[in-house]
Image (tube, rainbow, N blue to C red):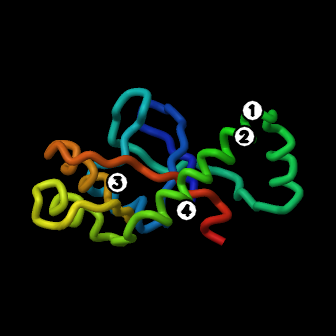
Amino acid sequence: MIRFSLICDQDHEFEAWFRNNDDFDKQKKRGFVECPACGSKKVGKALMAPAVSTGRRQEKIALAMNEMQKKAMAEIKALSEKIRENADYVGDKFAEEARKIHFGEADARGIYGEATLEEAKSLAEDGVGFMPIPVFPEDRN
């Protein structure tokens, strides 16, 4: 995942996460990237300093969280892991499989995978229940 600093044509600055640079380009082209402050779809990348993750930086972040925040983060991570352990990974076929389960065309079961913003909006419009599962940095390493 890559975090981009973005700016709209009204000079509102914000950040967003994308799988990679191509993902940003595709979402922007399809009109999925918009300013959270004003809704403008005229969004571009702003200048940003590279974020280099080091052990020291992660240690400082961990120290900055209080005990309640650390506990909550650990609970969220444990729940995320439990969901993945008890569900079938369907990859980028998530929307298709979720829709089949919702309409009774496939056996009901827990699934997880990836969906585009357009697919997620379509699922919501069809009344298909789903929710994002957080991905933690160490899950990607």
User: Amino acid type of disc 4?
Assistant: Met
Residue 28's tag is: 3
Q: Pointer 3 and pointer 2: residues touching (CB < 8 Å)? A: no
Mark 4 vs 3, N-terminal side: 4
Residue 68 is tagged as 1
Spatial separation of the CA atoms under disc 4 and disc 2: 24 Å
Identity of the amino acid at label 2? Answer: Lys
What residue appears at the point 19 percent right and 60 percent down from the top-left corner? 101
Q: Is residue 19 above or below residue 35?
A: below
Please determine whether, in this image, residue 110 is positioned above or below residue 126: below
- Helix, strand or loop status at disc 2: helix
Residues at circles 1 and 4 in contact by the CB criterion of under 8 Å: no
Discs 1, 2 touching: Cβ within 8 Å: yes
- Please tell me which residue is depicted at 41% across the width and 45% down the height of the picture: 43
Label located before the other in sequence (4 or 2): 4
Q: Name the residue under label 2.
A: 71
Q: Nearer the viewer, mark 4 or mark 3?
A: 4
The span from disc 4 to disc 3 (Cα, nearest Å) is 16 Å
| Precedes in sequence: disc 3 or disc 2 | 3
Residue at numbered disc 4? 1
Q: Is residue 29 left or right of residue 57?
A: left
Residue closest to the eye, 77 or 11: 77
Amino acid type, label 3: Lys
Would you call the spot at circle 3 few (<14 residues within 10 Å), some (14-19), or many (20 or more)?
A: some
Q: Where is residue 73 in the image (x, y as percent from the top left)?
A: 67, 44
User: What SS does tag 3 mark?
Assistant: helix
- Residue type, mark 1 in image: Met
